[in-house]
Amino acid sequence: MPKIKIAPSILSADWNKINKEVKEVEPYCELIHVDIMDGIFVSNKTIDAEFVSKIKTKIPLDVHLMVQEPSEDYISGFIKAGGSIITVHQEACGDLKGKLELIKGQGAKAGVSIKPKTPLNAIKDALNIADMVLIMTVEPGMAGQKFMSGPIGKIKELRRLKPNLDIEVDGGINPETIGIAAEAGANVFVAGSSVFGKKDRVGAIKELRESIKQ
């Protein structure tokens, strides 16, 4: 089983003081998760590559593109802005393998994400290219949603298929749900409001770790 990684999502942070927010959690987590929404693939719209380029951190930026058919230039912009892992959605890419190869060709790690109702079979041809698979446990597009248990079977199946792959979960992750996802085989956990929504962010991250039975 790969190393456990906690990835606080800046979607729930205060963007007006983003570097102060990131600095507070940085020593206690492995990744900083950056949600990018285009207003097309999902209804909300968020930050751009220029904003991401201003984030100062010593740990990898995990950039999740909830974006319809992101172009080569668009993807390149986020890699140049500091994205270490770029994740695209299977449902938003006509040529998924091509997009993953493009990301890797530019020196970043490539991730693929699927929505709660998308079957694992939809990404089977991409599994030998992807460095990470993100299985959504809420419908993408909004912070603070309730964890959906339906995708748990996909996490278990994927872990059987790929014992060493980074399997990320995003959506409704808190001290009650993180153990369920970890037991199924996930090892990378995106936490937005359950970290940045708390006064004691460090304590919140520690509580998430303690809730995973190793």
Image (spheres, grey):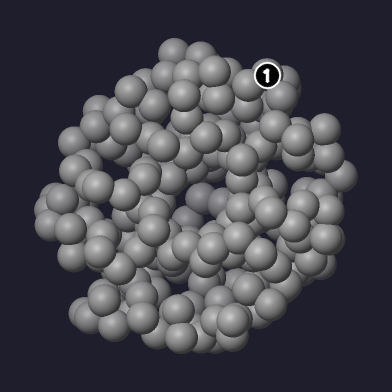
Q: Which residue is rendered at x = 30% and y = 68% of the image?
A: 28
Residue 27 at what x, y percent from top left?
25, 64
Nearest the viewer among 2 and 20 is 2
Q: Mark 1 Cα within 10 Å, few/some/many (few <14, many 20+)?
A: few
User: Residue placed farthest to the top in the image?
Assistant: 73
Residue nearer the viewer, 139 or 104: 104
Based on the displayed image, in which of its 4 quarters is residue 88 positioned? top right
Residue 61: % across, % down: 37, 44
Q: What residue type is labelled 1?
A: Gly
Numbered label tally:
1
Element at label 1: helix
Q: Which residue lies furthest to the right in this view?
A: 121
Query: In this orientation, does residue 162 appear?
Result: yes
Residue 118 image position (x, y, % from top left):
78, 49
The quarter of the displayed image where residue 181 is located: bottom right
Q: Which residue is drawn at 57% across and 34% down?
A: 110
For the N terminus, the image quarter is bottom right
Question: Where does the image place residue 185, in percent across and percent down from the top left?
Answer: 70, 68
Q: Is residue 39 above or below residue 158?
A: above
Evaluate whether residue 169 shows in this view.
Answer: no
Q: Which residue is drawn at 18% across and 51% down?
A: 18
Q: Residue at x 58, y 28 (%)?
A: 68
Q: Quadrant of the C terminus?
A: bottom right
205 left or right of 14 in image: right
Q: Quadrant of residue 149?
A: bottom right
Which residue position is annotated with label 1? Answer: 98
Residue 161 lies, with reference to residue 171, above or below; the image says above
Whether residue 167 is situated above or below residue 104 in the rendered picture: below
